[in-house]
Structures are given as structure tokens and as C-alpha cells.
Image (cartoon, rainbow, N blue to C red):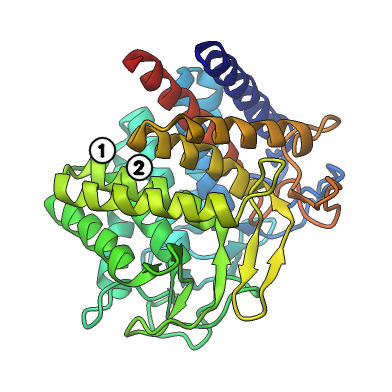
Amino acid sequence: MEKKLQLFKTELNHELISILNYWIDNTVDHKFGGFYGKIDHFNRVIPKAPKGAVLNSRILWTFSAAFNHFKKEKYLDIATQAFEYSKGHFYDEKNGGLIWEVDYLGKPLNTRKQIYAQGFGIYGFSEYYKATGNQESLDLATSLFDKIETHSYDIEYGGYIEALDKEWNHLYDMRLSDKDANFPKSMNTHLHVLEPYTNLYRVWENEMLAEKIQALIRVFLDHIIDTDTFHFNLFFEHDWEVKSRIVSYGHDIEGTWLLTEAAEIIGDIGLLREVQEIALKMTEATLHEGTDGDGAIFYEKNIETNHLDTDKHWWPQAEAVIGFINAYQISGDQKYLQKSMDVWQFINDNLFDPIHGEWFWSVNMDGVPNEKEDKAGFWKCPYHNTRACIEGIERLLLINQKT
């Protein structure tokens, strides 16, 4: 097993460098600034595509984290470009917060304040502060934290409302995307508020922030996780009435390690034990219901119709690599390490683009790539797969030190 883990770590490192090189070489918009809003499956740049706050914030996080990992200035250069573009084009100087979308010139296109996007802003700004010590970046991160807590927090029922308008007023349509249901609360937004709050706490050990992380974990334990099935419920009314019947296997496995990480970072031992127990049950549910014989994670299942979407998307595979390692670190059961390596092998065999680089959006059951989706774009960002590589390398180093 030791030799297998060493090879695993080597491959993660090699692929991490490859992904970073792809984004440096292909996505920087040298003419209009920032990064291209869309590159299609065939690696063709769509130069006038709109640019999203989530893509830019994820690039900011990715290259800040890459610099923190490798200490190479070329990664910091890209992170700085992303920081300056976020600050200059997405940050609303009058009302605070990040707007959702700009056009290819960097002019406001959609000024709504999606809480999901504020979360990724915190994620990127806090990581950039960690890389540089830039106080302005930390100030931006903490200002976004303040805006979320001031305008999105539900005082009556807890948790966070999905979206508000430019001036932080109520919106009727709060959907994150056209594919989502229009309800005031979602698992997805809460997961991606917990994640940046955890990262912010690494560089800003604020007592209120710790309390909010603790409360978010409780929201997951008490409302979002279905303790009969050990899957996440996805959409909710204000009072946490469940309004969905879909299982998202990628979010389930991603959530297992993000919840564990959050409980660890605030040092709440009792809460951590509770989270670890749930995380293992969720991992088992995903392992037995959401994985294929080739090692991959299925996309999702409709509980009402029993329809299983068997496509294998890039991001659930990346999250599964870490989710299964996390389960091993909790339990010591080597089957989880093997499962992580199985998923990684599937990624190697099916998702790497051998011609252009980066990963395909998804493949079907026959391993055929989906040619209709982006290689880079509004949702196809470098953070899932680079994070899987960085987390994997760091966790395997810890495992090696303990054995």
C-alpha cells in the first residue's frame, strides 16, 4: 500500500501542475482583462462571453492556494490578476458585496447578490490574504462576511436566504441557475457558505465567525442531512420544510469532508465526533448507492421516479477523491483509501483531455465525453480538481507520517 500511495501522490502532483498550466496558457483575457468567460469543449475561446463572479473567485482561490502550496511566483501573478479583477469589476463599491455577472468588457450585466457568490468571494479573498498578507483582501473577505450575516441570515429559523438584489432587497426568483428550484434556502448555498467561513477562520480567528461556523454545522445536522437515508436534502422553505426529492452524490461526498474540516477548524471536539459519525454514514450511503463498478460517482438520482442519472461529471469525481480519503482518516479502514484510488484511476482513464488538457465536463456510461459543455466557463472552474490534488497530496503526506 505504501508504494501505491506514493504513486498516487506523485500523480496528483503531476496533474495539479498540468491543470494550473492549462488555465495560465488558455484562459487569461489579455485584451479585455480578467479571464475568458467561456472556452468550449473543443478548446475554442468565446471571447465575448459574459464573465461570472464565481469563476473569477474560484480562479483567485485556485492560484492563491497553488502559490501557498508551491511558493512559485507565476501562480501568485495569476492570483493577483484575479484579485484585481474581482475588486475592480465584481465588487459593488456603493452597496457592498459581489455582483453576479459582467460582460466581456467588465461592465455590470447582472447585479444581483447571490449568497453563493459572496461565499466564493470570501473563499478567494481569504486565500489570497494567506498568500500575500494583503490587508485589503482580508478586509474584502470580512466585509462579505458582514453582508451575508446582515442581509441573508434568517433570524427566525436560522440559515441563509439564497439571493437578494443589488441593494440587498428581497427577490422573487432566487435560483442559483436555471436548473435549480426556486426556494429560499438550499443545501448548495449553505455548503458553500460553510466552506469559505472555514477558510476565513484560518486567517481571522474571530469569535462571531466561529459561532457562525458552529451554527452552520448544526443546520446541516438538524435540517439538511436526511438521517434516514444519510443524503443531503437539496431545497427548503424558510422553516426547513423539504422541497426536493433529488440525491446529489457529488454534494454528499463533498459535504462529508467539508463538514469534518469545519468542525476541526473551530476545535469543537464534541461536534467533531458527531460530524465524523455522520460523515462515515454518508460516505457509506454514497459508496453503496452512488458508485459504479468502474470506480466513478454517478451524478444524481430522483427518489420519486427512481431515475438514476448515470453520467460521470468532473466535479463529483474530484470531491470523491478527498471524501474517501477523509473517511479513511476518520475510520482507519483501508477500503476507503482504495476507493479514492479507484476514483482517481477513473479520472485518469476517462476525464483527462489528452489533446487540449484539463478535464472533460462529463462522460456517459460508455466513457464518451459530453461535447456540449464547457472546458472552462461560468461553472467549469479549476477549483474542484486543483483542490482535490492539493488536499490529496497534503492528506497523503499526513497519512504517511502516521504509518
Residue 218 appears at what percent x and percent y? Answer: 25, 63
Q: Which secondary structure, mark 2?
A: helix
The circle on residue 75 is: none
Side of 217 relative to 27 (left or right):
left
- Residue 308, can we see it? yes
Sequence-wise, the earlier of marks 2 and 1 is 2
* Residue at 24 percent of width and 53 percent of height: 274
Residue 140 appears at what percent x and percent y? Answer: 33, 50
Residue 361 appears at what percent x and percent y? Answer: 73, 49
Side of 220 relative to 390 (left or right):
left
Residue 401's quadrant in the figure?
top left
Q: Quadrant of the C terminus?
A: top left
Side of 274 relative to 392 (left or right):
left
* Residue at 81 percent of width and 46 percent of height: 45
Residue 145's quadrant in the figure?
bottom left
Which residue of the protein is positioned furthest toward the left in this rendering?
Answer: 207
* Residue at 41 percent of width and 59 percent of height: 191
Q: Amino acid at mark 2?
A: Ser
- Dot 1 crowding, Cα within 10 Å, few <14, some 14–19, many 20+: some
Residue 370 appears at what percent x and percent y? Answer: 83, 53
* Residue at 70 percent of width and 56 percent of height: 104
Query: Marks 1 and 2: in contact by CB < 8 Å?
Result: yes
Residue under label 1, please give it: 203
Which residue of the protein is positioned furthest toward the bottom in this rendering?
Answer: 172
User: Distance between the Cα atoms at labels 2 and 1?
Assistant: 7 Å
- Dot 2 crowding, Cα within 10 Å, few <14, some 14–19, many 20+: many
Q: Amino acid at mark 1?
A: Val
- Residue 383, can we see it? no
